[in-house]
Amino acid sequence: MELSAWIEALLPKEFLQKVFRLLPNPAFEQRMRWDLFKRPDYAYGVYRAALTAQALDIKKISAIEFGVAAGNGLLALEEVAREVSRHTGLDVDTYGFDTGTGMPPPIDYRDNPYLWQAGFFQMDGKALVSRLTQSKLILGEFTQTIPGFVKEYNPAPIGFISFDADYYSSTVSAFELLKEDHAYFLPRVLCYFDDIIGGDWELHSPYTGELLAIDEFNQQNRHMKIAKINGMRQKRVVPNWWHELMYAHHRFDHPLYNKHVFPDKNWQLKLGEEVPKN
Ligand SMILES: C[S@@+](CC[C@H](N)C(=O)[O-])C[C@H]1O[C@@H](n2cnc3c(N)ncnc32)[C@H](O)[C@@H]1O
C-alpha cells in the first residue's frame, strides 16, 4: 500500500479534510474527493454531469439554480462550472432563476409558511450582476420565466439543477422546465434539493414543501422520475449532510438513456478477486 493510502486508512477522514483545506492549491481531483469546494454538492453535481456528457459525446452542458436570493449559490455554481470546464475541457453554462424581489406569498400550508414568508431573501440585482462572470440571471416568477426559457436561450443539455426555492408551489413551477424536449437535457440530470432537512425549526415531510412536489411529480409522470441517489453517503469519503440532498432526475424515454456510459467497456470479474467499492 502507498504511503498516502496508509495515511488515509489510519487517520480520521474529517481530520484529513481539515488538513487538505489548508493546502494552498489542491489539485482538482483532491478538491472533489475531499469536498474542498465552497459548495461540494454543486461541485459533485456539475462534475458528474460533465462526465456523463463526455461519455455521451456531448461538448457543452448547462447548470441551473432555481432560487438565487443574494447570489452566493450562483457565484459558487459559476466557480464550479469554471473548474469543471478547466478540468474536463467541456463548456458549462450557468443560469439562475429568481423573482429578484424575494419570496412570493405562500399559497397555503404546503409552502410551509411557518418557516418562510413573502419578501424573504431579496436580491441586490446590481451588486450580483457586477460579480457574475458568465451566468444568465433570469428574473421574474418561475411561472412567467420558465415557459419561454428554452426558446429564448436554447440552452445546452441541462445536466445539473439546484432546487432552492423553498416552497412546494415554487418547486412545482420549477418542475415545469422538465416537461421540455429531451434535447435540452442529459438523460439523467443531477439534482440538489436544499429544503428537505434544514435546522430544528424545519420539520420536513413528504406532505409539504419540496418533498411533496417530488412525490407528486413522480405520481404524475410514468416515464420521468426524480429519485434520491441511493447510498450517496457511502460513495463519499467524508460523511456530510449534503449527501441526503442529492437526487437524480431520470428521463427513461430520452434517446440516450440506455447508452452505455460506464467507463469499463468490457466489465469482467475474476474468480477470487473482490471488486473495490470506492
Ligand atoms: C433560500 S433563497 C435561495 C438561496 C440561494 N440558492 C443560495 O444558495 O444562496 C430562495 C429564493 O427563491 C426565490 N423564489 C421562490 N419562489 C419563487 C418563484 N415562484 N419564482 C421565482 N423565484 C422564487 C426567492 O426569491 C428566493 O430568493
Image (tube, grey):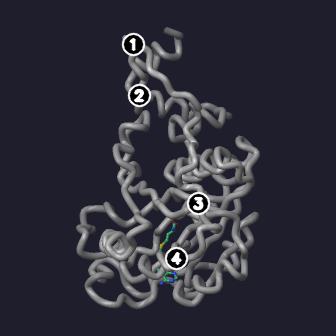
**Dot 1 alpha-carbon crowd within 10 angstroms: few under 14, some 14 to 19, many 20 or more:** few
Give the number of the disc on residue 255: 3
Report, in whole angstroms, how far the alpha carbon at label 3 lies from the one at label 1.
36 Å
Label 3: element kind: loop
Please state which of the two labelled residues, at mark 2 or mark 4, is closer to the viewer.
Answer: 4
Q: Are marks 2 and 1 in contact (CB under 8 Å)?
A: no
Disc 3 residue lies near ligand 1 with CB under 8 A: no
Q: Earlier along the polypeptide chain: callout 3 or callout 2?
A: 3
* Residue lying at 54% horizontally and 87% vertically, measured from the top left: 141
Give the number of the disc on residue 238: none
- Quadrant for the C terminus, please: top left
Give the number of the disc on residue 179: 4
Q: Amino acid at mark 3?
A: Pro
Q: Amino acid at mark 1?
A: Leu
The answer to which of 178 and 173 lies nearer the viewer is: 178
Report, in whole angstroms, how far the alpha carbon at label 2 lies from the one at label 4.
35 Å
**Dot 3 alpha-carbon crowd within 10 angstroms: few under 14, some 14 to 19, many 20 or more:** few
* Residue lying at 70% horizontally and 62% vertically, measured from the top left: 93
Report, in whole angstroms, how far the alpha carbon at label 3 lies from the one at label 4.
15 Å
Q: Amino acid at mark 4?
A: Lys
Where residue 98 sits: x, y (%)?
56, 79
Q: Earlier along the polypeptide chain: callout 2 or callout 1?
A: 1
Return the residue at label 2.
277
The answer to which of 79 and 245 lies nearer the viewer is: 245
Report, in whole angstroms, how far the alpha carbon at label 2 lies from the one at label 1.
17 Å
Please state which of the two labelled residues, at mark 2 or mark 1, is closer to the viewer.
Answer: 1
* Residue lying at 44% horizontally and 66% vertically, measured from the top left: 224
Return the residue at label 1.
271
